[in-house]
Amino acid sequence: MRVRLPSLSRRQIISGAVALVLVAGLVGWAAAPKPKSFRTTDQMITVKTGPGDGSEVTLDTTLYLPKSAGADDPVPAILLAHGFGGTKQSVRSDAERFADQGYAVLAWTAQGFGRSTGEIHLDHPDWEVKDAERLIDWLAARPEIRKDGNDPKVAAVGGSYGGALSLLLAAQDARVDAIVPMITWNDLVNVFLPGGVFKRQWAGEFFGSSENPADPQCGRFAADICKAYLDIATTGRSTPATEALLRRSSPSQVLDRIKAPTLLIQGQVDTLFPLSEGDANARGIAANGTPVRVAWYTGGHDGGSGPQSEVDRLRQLSDQWLGHYLKGNGATPPTSFTYSRVSGLNAQGRGLVTAASSVDAYPGLRNAGAAVELQGPDQRIANPPDGNPAPISSLPIAGLAGLLGTAGAGGITREIPGQHADFVSAPVGAALDVTGAPKVRLRVASPTGDATLFVKLYDVPAKGEPSVPDGLIAPIRLTGLPKSIGDAVPVTVTLPAVVHRFEAGSRVRVTVATADSGYWSPAEPVVYTVALDGPVDLPAIAGIPLANPDVVWRYVLAGLIAAIALGLAVVLILARRRARRIDRSVDAELVDTPLVVRGLRKEYKDFVAVSRVDFTVRRGQVVGLLGPNGAGKTTSLRVLMGLTRPTAGEILVFGHRLLPGAPVLSRVGALVEGPGFLPHLTGAQNLELYWKATGRPAEDARFDEAYEIAGLGTAVNRRVSTYSHGMRQRLAIAQAMLGLPELLVLDEPTDGLDPPQIAEMRKVLRRYATGGRAVLVSSHLLAEVEQTCTDVVVMHRGEVVAAGPVDEIVGESPSVQLDVSDVDTAEKVLQELTGVRSVAWSGGRGLVVDIDGAPRAEVVAALVRAGVGIDRVAPRRRLEDAFLSLVGGDTKASGERP
Amino acid sequence: MSTDVVGGAAVSTDVVGGAAVSTEVVGGARGYRPGATLSLWTEIRRQASRRRTQMALGFMVLLPLIILIAFQLDSGSNNDNGGGNGQFSRLSDLATSGGPNFTLFTLLVSSGFLLVVVVALFCGDTVASEASWGSLRYLLAMPVPRARLLGIKLAVSLLYSLLAVLTLVGTALLAGTLRYGWAPLSAPIGGEIPAGTGVVRLLEIVGYLCVCLLVVASLAFLLSVSTDAPLGAVGGAVLLQILSNILDQITALGNLRTVLPTHYNDAWLGLLSSPMQVDDLVKGAVAALAYATVFFALGFWRFLRKDVVS
């Protein structure tokens, strides 16, 4: 057996297909991987390196080359260096982004890491930096790379370890055209021994990350570096030798040789390479007249890449920088300085929210600002033996702070009782912005003459926990201190630079602690005395807020609202115009004819419900619309009520063309397809609300007459949901008659009524039609129609098969059904009687007599005269005959016809 | 067959029909004006009498009281979710700190689902229920112009939805203030907001929620004119909202999620932070208005062309 799929109309198929294609296209466009615009080549490149080029190191490299690049269209190149502990894979996404912009990108794994050979020399000029020079040589030999003579267009970009490399490389190799060093160091001595205090946790993190089974002690570190680390970590101090070793790997020594325009990006949430490192680099390079642009962002070794808005800002800066200095695109970028402040957590838990600002020139860390007075007596604080217990000001693993739920909001600090001195300000009156390195003067006394202290700037909000902005603290190591605080000389302590806002009502607190988990501190227990000398200087920058890129959405919103308003106005105007253009002409000859149906046709997508219907209802008529189930009666009535649109043909009501919602419908009362009431309301409320909804005056409704017709008595005050079928039907007829409409259309009105009610209804309808009104009754009950209607329209298979007065349809010679005592005698008598056309036995004692002209009384008299007893005389139901002959005994509904 | 055939004599529209009846609108019955049919007030009355309207509004009163009682029953013992449930636990911790905060909590717990269901109920049921009762065809045969019928029904549905939200907020504010006092609004992030400003913030939050709920309203409305089953329209709208919420949880979808209608539904939390974060609010409003416009337009377009066969 064949299973037929549900048939769809052409329109459904087209609109469905269009929707499907649109959705699929959108999803595909958004989700499909874009074809790559570049090729990658992995290659192990062996370079001569080390002092005197005496060594060979093999570097694991990947070249990302735009497909467009060739000898005839060479492209500029970017050397992309990775961070400490990473490989060339760590920078892949950045490399792909640059390659997509049309740069050749060479990423490589630095020696001592990954699959590259060699040892870690901490960006030593003779090793890692020389490797990079050799890679520039390698790039210069390729035809796809753009060159000025023999000098390739090349930039060095990298973060942290790679950032220092770019600085050192630019100092050593004049072929470098631009550099973008990010979150990197200026002087490794300052980094690992800030204020002379060993930053042991970060150093350990660095050193412990290199794994080499052959040398468990040093990993893949070069022997001299390893030895220096072990030396410092053991004693907590540096020696001139170790300092010299660290300085060799520090850009601080070579800044004056950097001529390549530098975009210097430094992290604000970075306890490893704080803003002061970037500051020193910026000043050193700018001192030669080299263009330097500085940007800070709310991330770093502790804060990670920061929120997306920051990532976007930095990308825009570096794209602009490289675009100009490497490709020669665009105007010279300004050397303005941008930074941003964490303004809060995203309310929906989507990270931090930042507010970026800009200043025309890099202002450094020590601007003028507010001097905030701090209160606090001289305090005695204990140095714990072996630096334990110690507060944790930061965790040297980027992002871990985020896991602990304090992402960037501040260090997770808890001071140890007896080990810290606090100096607190009064609550600040208005919000106080700090941008730069605060300064404070301390006086310290120590019985040993030495002191190792950790100075921190706290934000103490009116409500909530105090915190150290970004977990940045200043370790200091003081020597030659007096034993008594009275003899102590003030020392100026520069706190780490921050970008922070003290909200109104917050207090500024300077805390001096004796130990910190991140730093080395003396093992001997000592008690220091600490006093504060003067206010804390909080520098500030008058930055101009950068436009928030999301502001564009506000314009989108305004535009959308305007577009909606405009669209609405246009639609209203068009609708009004269209309404005016609708043919409202009136057929003058039919103005007094309640209903004219002409050539009505209604097709549904898969069948024809009404193929052609014509009929007329005149004033004073009660017209019965007859037909078997599915003949198309209800469909015709639906069109008549404006519920559906005809496929062809027209309906005129009092001469007005009937369209959905045509005003002339207000002169038609209807019951179509059963009652429709709000079930939770009473009958009376339903009628009242119905009339209210018509908007017509209440006195026109004739409620009393309607209630009389409904005959519901007190039941009108019961909820309709409690009504029987017949009660609802009567209420529906009453509703149709509200306002006594000139044309009443009733669909199966006697459905559910009992015989006395049916009889009553007949009278009501007959009466209703008098006085110029008209009634159209659709029914399949022939007797009812025959007894109620003046006219009849017979429909079959969607067509009118007969129409006219009932008498005409029934015919002029009605036959009679007789029940007699003696069938044989009666038959004989009747056959001899003139005026009788035929006599037929209809079973039992019944006869059907077709009397042609003879009055019924005469027939009865003739039988009585012949002595035949008569039990019953009844006119035969001729409408039924007529109907059956018209529809041909075909009981198939029109809906079922193929 | 007795059809009068008339030569196409188009007569001026001044001709009025009806023997003894004078008409005000061309061809209409006495007193009939299309613009006067199914007035806003009539529709409000029709809907007000419905059990579903009364129940929904009643529940809006009841819910804050239930929450209030639930907080009263708190024995103060350990909280079993470990307090690590983000915004929710932080807001619930603050819920009993004052009337505005109690209101905020009530909004938080009801905005995700309850209000969606209520709005879907008001907007999804409005046309579909008339179709299922059969009363729609009598309204159209009255005749109430289709656009007017739809416009009035939509306006009344939206009014009831707004009333439901305001009832919820009003009851919560009243009950919360009576029980916990008139305290500043403490936000989980961004510190305290003075009670007066806090109420303004609450109203802004309600405003944003209403804009977001327009998506559900419009979808329910579109389904309502497309089906005769009220439950189908209400359920369909809620279902699609749930689907959108589920998809929004799948981070693998990346930026595709930002086009989901529910993606920015929580953005009102930004109004509580200091400074206010309105960027997501704006994006959310753009998305909501765009979706709502499309769905409403489709709903009207469909209904004005539809064959009403119910």
Image: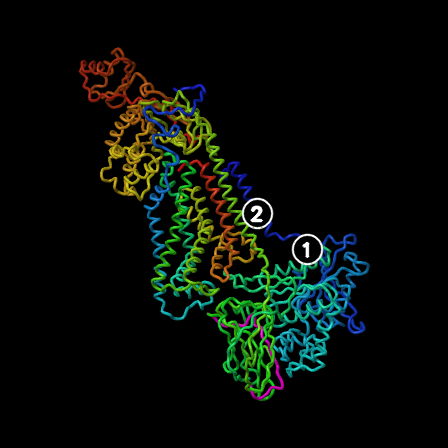
Percent x, y of residue B129:
38, 43
What residue type is disc 2 on? Ala
Subunit bearing disc 1: A
Tell me which segment is drawn in magenta. Answer: A463-485
Q: Nearer the viewer, mark 1 or mark 2?
A: 1
Q: Residue at x 35, y 52 (%)?
A: B57
Name the residue beneath numbered marker 2. Answer: A24
Colouring style? rainbow
- Determine whether the residue tagged by mark 1 lies in a helix, strand or loop: helix
Query: Which label was assigned to residue A100?
Result: 1
Above or below residue B74? Residue A30 is above
- Determine whether the residue tagged by mark 2 lies in a helix, strand or loop: helix
**In the displayed structure, does residue B257 sit left or right of residue A789?**
right
Foreground of the two, A65 or A11? A65
The answer to which quarter of the image holds residue A481 is: bottom right
Percent x, y of residue B184:
41, 64
- Look at the image and say whether residue A468 sits in the magenta stretch: yes
